[in-house]
Amino acid sequence: MKRREFIRIGAAAAFLSNIAAFENRWEKSGAKDKISIGVDPRIELYAVVLYLSDFRGLKNEQGVIEARVVTDLDFSYKREIDRRFSSCKGHEAVEIYNEMAARGLFRFGHPPSVMLHLSNPPLLEEKIRIDDFLVKMAGSRAKLNEFVHGMRLFARDVNFMDFFKGHESAYSQLASDYRRNMEWDYVKDLEDYYGYGQDSYHLILAPLFHPGGFGPRIKTPEGHYQAYAVIGSKGVTGDRPNFGSGDSMRRLCWHEFSHSFVNHLTDLHLGQLRGPVGALESRELPAQVMEQIKTFGLWDVHLADQTSEYVVRAVTTRLSAVKLGLEKANQAMELEKNEGFSHLDAVCECLERYEKQRDTYPTLKDYFPQIVAAFKKLAGQEEAR
């Protein structure tokens, strides 16, 4: 589904927040890269409740689901979840989530972000304070506590960790499959391009999720930055979910981990971006959609998200040019423009100047004021340098 259409039909609240560090032992980072890969029990617990819920995603004007939250693929793991948990559709946790999802804000990236602030099931203790933004999306602190309490009850009532532990070998195989499909060290591409690295990289495989992802960065109590990518299944191989290969896998990995490099820079410069990006969005979005976003108090969140998406998608497009050549870059550009990023070529041109001036701008953080200037030029508010 095109991202602009996604926003238009009501997904403007699907934004991300910081999440807590992993407590699980996964397939460790390989000798050739820094990524640890695995399946997280908190995400799987939420995924089962989501799968049992009424919410399947955003529908277009014809009532067809276009922004899907759960996979529509068929594989044995999903069929086993049907058999084991389908009788739990009336559980308190599912009813609570139905209500919250129907409100329209606590959906997409928000519930997984909440889950990853918590300890493993069934205790689900709040290990890192859930931030005010997620509380707002949930409706209130009381409603958020109700959600967590429901998830805790569900985990205990269905002996969820017994189910999870019974699939550890299958989860390990998914992680091994993913690593085997990696063509090279994608993280090194990002660190070279951005000019610095995160302290660690964790990729969560979520078989029941839609074939996209989320890419938050968290700061640990010790001050370390950890990058995360939560990836949904994209296909089926031998009755097992797979998470892509080739172009689609590489671009998604680049994309989700890029958010850990870009989002905080966008937030840092939001005061300067609010005017030009707001003007650009005002030209792109219907007035009623803009009003809905502002009514929920999410206009700044939307502008930050849209700016970050532009920069992330421009970086992945430029990486295609640098690593694979002009033809691949043109294909990537066309895909992104079809998603609604009509100004991407201008942002890519700005990044090309960055690539030629790394002695002056060793990191994207150093160069980011030039990206702000490019958005001002696009909006007709200031000439880019």
Image (spheres, rainbow, N blue to C red):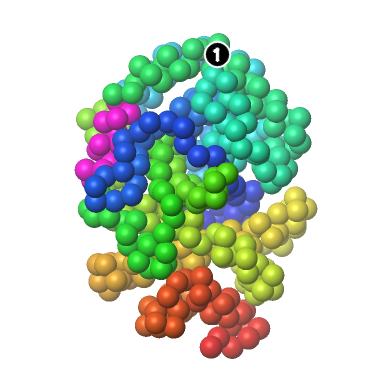
Could you say which quadrant of the image residue 88 lies in? Answer: top right
Which residue corresponds to the image point at 38% horizontal and 24% vertical from the top-left?
Answer: 78
Q: Position of residue 335 (x, y in %)?
A: 39, 62
Could you say which quadrant of the image residue 369 lies in? Answer: bottom right
Which residue corresponds to the image point at 61% horizontal and 55% vertical from the top-left?
Answer: 8
Amino acid tagged 1: Arg
| Left or right of residue 202, residue 30 in this image | left
Could you say which quadrant of the image residue 197 lies in? Answer: bottom left
Which residue corresponds to the image point at 65% horizontal and 39% vertical from the top-left?
Answer: 130
Please tell me whether the stretch drawn in magenta is mainly helix, strand or loop: helix
Q: Which residue is mark 1?
A: 156
Residue 351 in the magenta stretch? The answer is no
Of helix, strand and loop, which one carries label 1?
A: helix
- Seen from the viewer's position, the closer of residues 243 and 62 is 243
- Seen from the viewer's position, the closer of residues 241 and 150 is 150
Q: Is residue 257 above or below residue 331?
A: above
Q: Is residue 225 above or below residue 268?
A: above
Q: Residues within 10 Å of mark 1 (few under 14, many from 20)?
A: some
Q: Position of residue 64 (x, y in %)?
A: 52, 41
Is residue 336 visible in this depiction of the protein? no
Which residue corresponds to the image point at 43% horizontal and 52% vertical from the top-left?
Answer: 199
Q: Position of residue 57 (x, y in %)?
A: 54, 39
